[in-house]
Amino acid sequence: MARTLAMFTDTSLCIGCRACQVACKQWNELDMEVPDWTGTYQNHTHFTDKTFRLVRFIEEPGGKPNGDLAWLLMSDVCKHCADAGCLNACPTGAIYRTEYGTVNINQDLCNGCRYCVPACPFGVVSFNEQTGTAKKCTFCNDRIHNGLGPACAKACPTESIQFGFRDELVGKAQKRVEHLKAMGFKEAQLYGADARGFLSGLNAFFLLLGKPSTYGLPESPSLPQKRVLAESLLSIGSALLVGVGALVAFRQRNGGKEE
Amino acid sequence: MSLLQSPHWPVLIDVYFFLGGLAGGAFVIATIAHLLDARRFRDVSRVGYYLALLALIPCPIILIVDLGVPLRFMNMVRAFNPLSPMSMGAWALLGFSVCAFLAALMTLLEDAGRARNLGGAKIVVGVVGGFFAFFLAAYPGVLLSATARPLWAGGHALGALFLAVGASTGAAAVALVLMLIGRTAAGLAPLRTMLVLALLIQLLAVVVFVMSAQSSGSLASTRALATLTSGSHSLTFWLGAIVVGSVLPLVIGLVNVKRRSPGLTALASILVLIGGFLVKFVIVAAGQM
């Protein structure tokens, strides 16, 4: 396997210009959609089959160091989890991991069962009615295999989205957190950078200026498939009870007269 | 606001969950009846095997039609992924289809007088198929658990619940058919007992599910549970699935163990079929909200 590639999204640098969102749409030839009225500049409310990069606009009262309202911006994307719920859920093998550690959906194999959609802890994977298949960020698979960074990272004017080798980016990100903390952003933290943390780390990780929940992110998402073993054992227990019940029922002496 | 997405599975998927469970339940009952006293319970095993195949036939059709690209349904068996209940379920459906077809075919040959001594082969098909039958009834519950949806992931024992519902609906369906064709001599009494026991396991599993989701410590899960227990789906859940679909037939079943009234058996069976569908429907629907 080649060295793991990653995207580091530093939300403290995001200015909400949505160049990443547009670049993603253009490069990946994603159709336009009717905008949602969300009450903010954010469009759309969540990822869709045609929106793989999504700038979230969050208003957090008292979120600034001086107690003012913080206007938080976050360019969200598929996290390309090291332990990916969608990949583990896929029954056809259409969802696969590339040699760079990214997670991709083979559009020629996907048969549209939609099980990956609820299996994603971040609500990334979406179903496309036209193709009948599941869609999500490809980490610009065609670009990274030709020595180019993802379109979103290329388009970002403030280097809020950085592309590179994962180990190098994590080091950079840690320094940036320390710098921000020294500036007074006490809640500055990395999300998904730790390879020993949740989902064995995210290959698209983030620097947040507040708690993950402020951004609508789960604090510590777990791999959905971790529940398979316990639930299977409970089902086997239920099967044993039902089996014994059936044996008892069909063994009992037929006492009185039958109707 | 939650960022999570819903698969938007249509009601047809609930119909599949219901029919798959019913087919599995009927098959296991037929096998146990055949194993314990093939002669005395002949009608139970006959009806059970025929019913299992009949209930099964719409299942693959429903699943294929629901796919985004139906012609790629065979891709389900190009991978074998033990961590994915969707993958294992596809394999179990395939295995069960073979067994259910063979069991029904052997029963048909016996009924037509074309074959006499299929005992050994039938037992092998019945036992192997019984394993697949249990799997088919339970896996949809495990499948729901292994997602990020707060309701399904929050509570335990969905697989156990779905399996018990398969057993109760299977027993109810076999009992109803036996009554319709007037072959109630030996089989109805054990089916009545079976119905009561399966309903008890079913209700136990519901209690475990609701209580574990309540105490999961996840705000999203307790919120999602509220849509089931006090929100927009609460009437279907409490009145439909629990009271009318489980508790009422259980009470009728308990009273009827002594009274042996055919009318009450039929009523309990019909209620169990309605309740079995509703409990699966309401959990799938509330979990997708």
Image (cartoon, coloured by chain):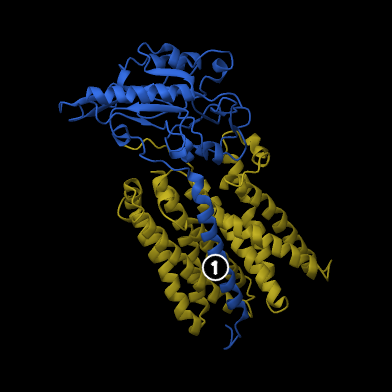
Please tell me the colour of chain A.
blue
The quarter in which the N terminus of chain B is drawn is: top left
Image point (51%, 34%), residue name? A82
Please tell me the colour of chain B.
yellow
Q: Nearer the viewer, residue A9 or A75?
A: A9
**Mark 1: amino acid:** Ala
Image point (56%, 29%), residue name? A105
- Of all residues, the one furthest to the bottom in this rendering is A256
Q: What chain does badge 1 belong to?
A: B
The quarter in which the C terminus of chain B is drawn is: top left
In terms of image quadrants, where is residue B69?
top right
In this view, B58 is above or below A59: below
Image point (60%, 68%), residue name? B174
Q: Is residue A29 left or right of residue B48?
A: left
In terms of image quadrants, where is residue A58?
top left
Q: Is residue A145 visible?
A: yes
Q: Secondary structure at mark 1?
A: helix
In this view, A193 is above or below B215: above
Count residues near mark 1 (Cα–Cα under 10 Å), then give few for <14, some for 14-19, many for 20+.
Answer: many
Q: Is residue A31 visible?
A: no
Q: Nearer the viewer, residue A9 or A121?
A: A9
**Picture coordinates of residue B162 (x, y %)?**
51, 58
**Picture coordinates of residue A133 (x, y %)?**
55, 31
In this view, B44 is above or below A123: below
**Picture coordinates of residue B86 (x, y %)?**
57, 45
Query: Dot 1 corresponds to which residue?
Result: B172
Q: Nearer the viewer, residue B203 or A149?
A: A149
In this view, A225 is above or below A82: below
**Picture coordinates of residue B11 (x, y %)?**
48, 47
